[in-house]
Structures are given as C-alpha cells and as structure tokens.
Image: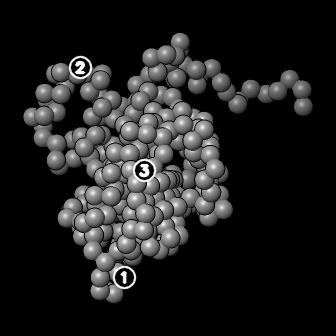
Amino acid sequence: MLMAGDIQRALDPSRLMRDAGITPDPWQAKLLRERPKRALLLCCRQSGKTETAIFLALWTALFEPGALVLIVSPSQRQSAEVFRRLMIQYSKLQGVPELTQESALRAELGNGSRIVALPGSERTVRGYTGARLIVLDEAARVDDALLAALRPSMAVVNGSLIMLSTPFGKRGEFFRAWSEGQGWTRVSVPASACPRISQEFLDDERRELGAMRYSEEYELAWLEDTEAVFPVAIVDRAFTDKIQPLWR
C-alpha cells in the first residue's frame, strides 16, 4: 500500500471500511474517526453495529503493533461468528500486515498484534493482560461477572472498551452503563434510522412480533425485567438521599 493510503487509514479508520468495499453510515464514520475509549452502541439488528466494532478492532490490530484485541460474546459460537466476519473484511484489505497464525478463534499478524475470540464466561476470559481493545457483543445478555473479569485486562495499557447490543430488559451492566454510567460515548440507532431496512419490512415485523417485542427489537425500548417483582422505577423511588440522619 502506498504511504499516502497508509496515512489516510491511520488518521481515519473509516477509510478501512471503504477500502473493504463498504460505505459507512454517517454515525459509523463518526465513531470510527473518534475511536472513543468507552462506547455503548445501542443499535437494532442489521444496523451495522457489529461491522463498526469489527473495523475498530481491525484498525487497532493494524495500526497499534503488538496490540491484543479481545472479542467476547455470550457464547463461543457467537464470538466465532464475529471473528469470522472480521477475517473476511481483513482479507479484502490490501497492504496490511500479513497473517502469521490463524485458527477459528485466533489470528496473529506480522506486526505482533493478536485478535482472540472468547466465549462469554467469567472463567475463560481471565488471564489475558494488556488488551488494547475489548469488543463485547450482545452486551445486554452477558453476566455482570464477565465484565468485572474483563476490565483488569485493559489496566496496564489503558485499553478501550466497546459494548454493543439491543436492549434486554432493565437489568445488567449494559443497562446500568447506558442509563447512568459516566464517561461513555453513546450511540443509538433504531431501525427507523437505518437506510437498509424498509418501512414495509418494519410494518410486517410489528404485526408479527406485537408492539412490545417490536419496541425492544427495533425501537430500542428498555422494557421492565420480567423476572423482577417490582418495576425499576418503583424501586428507584423507594430510595432518597434527602433524609437527614438521626445521628451526626
């Protein structure tokens, strides 16, 4: 690859997506250029959230030599699918570091970077250190203990974390981070904002799924946890910091 093209990719990661034959949506190009340290992607299915995370992962591996990139999903099958899609996009790029090792869940590049796909188990993610980027797919559906086990792997290199998901009830770390977390870049892409999803399809889905399920899958509504005895709003209203203590 010519030096000019390399510099363009380094300065603008969305160029990688274009070089792979994909025209990014405006929100995708913006997020790729910003490369936030902490990002939450609350996006409907087929909106391009996984592709965005894939190209963030590729940029990190290509332009930060020796980087460790972890891809984590609720199951090994899902992690392997994201990894497979990433490698397909890698194969479309010209002038990038060559592969030195590759398996169904792991790739090593000539610049020393590694991309590893892991299942969403707290036991399996421990032991990794120096993660420059962690991509947590279907983040609303993973156990809270998983995120607690992953975070220390970013510590020594001040790594980045991107969590992507559709809503899955008012519960878990993804919901907490979205609703009250500090320091997160938040991106919300409902189906109505995705140019690749037709209104005719959405009308059919609304009829088939019903209003409640449709609102969660396509309109990104946070529904009450069906396992909870009381709605989250009622529980929140039961607590206050305005009462004076009995003793000082």
- Label whose residue precedes the other's in the sequence (3 or 1): 1
**Rendered position, 209 above or below 63:** above
Q: Nearer the viewer, residue 235 or 37?
A: 37
Dot 3, how many residues are within 10 Å of its Cα: few (below 14), some (14-19), or many (20+)? some
- Label whose residue precedes the other's in the sequence (2 or 1): 1
Q: Nearer the viewer, residue 216 or 54?
A: 54
Which residue position is annotated with label 1? 7
- Res. 133 visible in picture: yes
Percent from the top left, x then y, of residue 27? 31, 57
Percent from the top left, x then y, of residue 241? 70, 31
The disc label shown at residue 136, or none: none
Dot 2, how many residues are within 10 Å of its Cα: few (below 14), some (14-19), or many (20+)? few
- Res. 35 visible in picture: no
Residue 8 occupies which quadrant of the picture? bottom left
**Residue furthest bottom in the image:** 3
- Side (left or right) of 60 relative to 239: left
Q: Secondary structure at mark 1?
A: helix
**Rendered position, 27 above or below 8:** above
The disc label shown at residue 210, or none: 2
Q: Amino acid at mark 3?
A: Leu
Q: Secondary structure at mark 3?
A: loop
Q: Are marks 2 and 3 in contact (CB under 8 Å)?
A: no
Which residue position is annotated with label 3? 105
Q: Secondary structure at mark 2?
A: loop
**What residue appears at the point 23 percent right and 22 percent down from the top-left corner?**
209
Residue 167 occupies which quadrant of the picture? top left
Q: Amino acid at mark 2?
A: Gly
